[in-house]
Image (tube, rainbow, N blue to C red):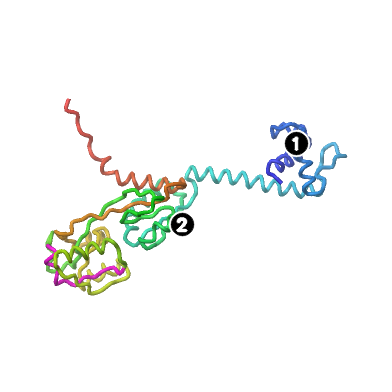
Amino acid sequence: MELGQLEMLVAVAQEKSFSRAADRVHRTQSAVSQAIQRLEAEIGSSLFDRSSRSGSLTEAGRVLYEYAQQMLNLRREARAAIQELGSLRRGTIAIAANEYTVMHLLPVLGAYRARHPHIAIEIKRSLASRIPLEILAREAEIGIVTYRPAQPALTVVPFATDELALLVAPAHPLAGRAMVSIRELGAESFLAHNVRSPYRERVVQTFERHRTPLHIAMELPTLEAVRRLVELGLGVALMPRLAAAAEIARGDIAAIGVREMRFERSVHLVYRSKALSHAALAFVQCACELQRAPEKRSPAPRSRS
């Protein structure tokens, strides 16, 4: 049973004529008659009362006519829904991020929602090391990571940068400094996030290279817990500056540069190189536009001629 046959059944039933139905569906009368005959052979019952000049439906025909209308309406709704996806009037994006990288999404989420208010956004909290695998498994469409995944099937787009900072309480002796040396940190008690990462290993190796002890007094499950304990003066922490941006702005935490660890942390959007949805593609475009925004605001160079 094909939708084209059902469309002809509905046309004949509504037009009360095989010839008018043929004109309506842009087929010959013979083609319409053959389609109805195939339907009747498939269900094993006549659909139209051939003795009636008005071509009225039999009882079986009326039952099939009702279902045919529902199926054709569903086809029409499906086409409209797909068109709405293309016009970004509906849809859902699943984005995988961790506790830190999700903070880079905040300005993008605001801008994207302003442009496309009908698109639902789901932020999945994931381990950074698992995000590329979740993207490939289609558990999320877009991921936010601070490293370049090795999987060749993923597209990696530079999205933002952040810098490492030493976070201390406002009453800490180093709080008034703009920059310190790593050798000044050998006696400090450090608070650390208990999720291992390449970034953390880079910090450990830097301390080892400068023959300075790294005393990790406490490991905590969330960045929020690390920030709170730094505010309370229970230790210091090395974290990306953005991770404590609000506390730094309020003066609850002081951020200090470390001379030997002045390296930036790059943040990337990652997604499957093929089959990105309209909604997800629009999100990537929005993020990239915001990342380029400072360049757009810069004045154009004047001609010297």
- Of callouts 1 and 2, which one flags the residue occurring earlier in the amino acid sequence? 1
Q: Amino acid at mark 1?
A: Val
Residue 98 falls in which quadrant of the image? bottom left
Say left or right for 102 vs 301. right
Residue 165, above or below 304: below
Residue 247 falls in which quadrant of the image? bottom left
SS assignment at label 1: helix
At a point 26% along the width and 52% down the height, the residue shown is 161
x then y, percent, for residue 10: 73, 41
Say left or right for 236 vs 177. right
**Disc number for residue 290:** none
Is there CB contact under 8 Å for labels 1 and 2? no
Residue at image mark 1: 32
The residue range painted magenta reads 181-194
Cα separation, mark 1 vs mark 2, equals: 46 Å
x then y, percent, for residue 273: 42, 47
Nearer the observer, 224 or 269: 269
Q: Quadrant of the C terminus?
A: top left
x then y, percent, for residue 16: 78, 37
SS assignment at label 2: loop
Nearer the observer, 108 or 145: 145
Say left or right for 297 vs 114. left
Q: Amino acid at mark 2?
A: Ala
At a point 22% along the width and 37% down the height, the residue shown is 299
Would you say residue 252 is visible in this rendering?
A: no
Would you say residue 260 is visible in this rendering?
A: yes
Badge 2 local density, few (<14 within 10 Å), some, or many (20+)? Answer: few
Residue at image mark 2: 137
Badge 1 local density, few (<14 within 10 Å), some, or many (20+)? Answer: many
Residue 145, above or below 114: below
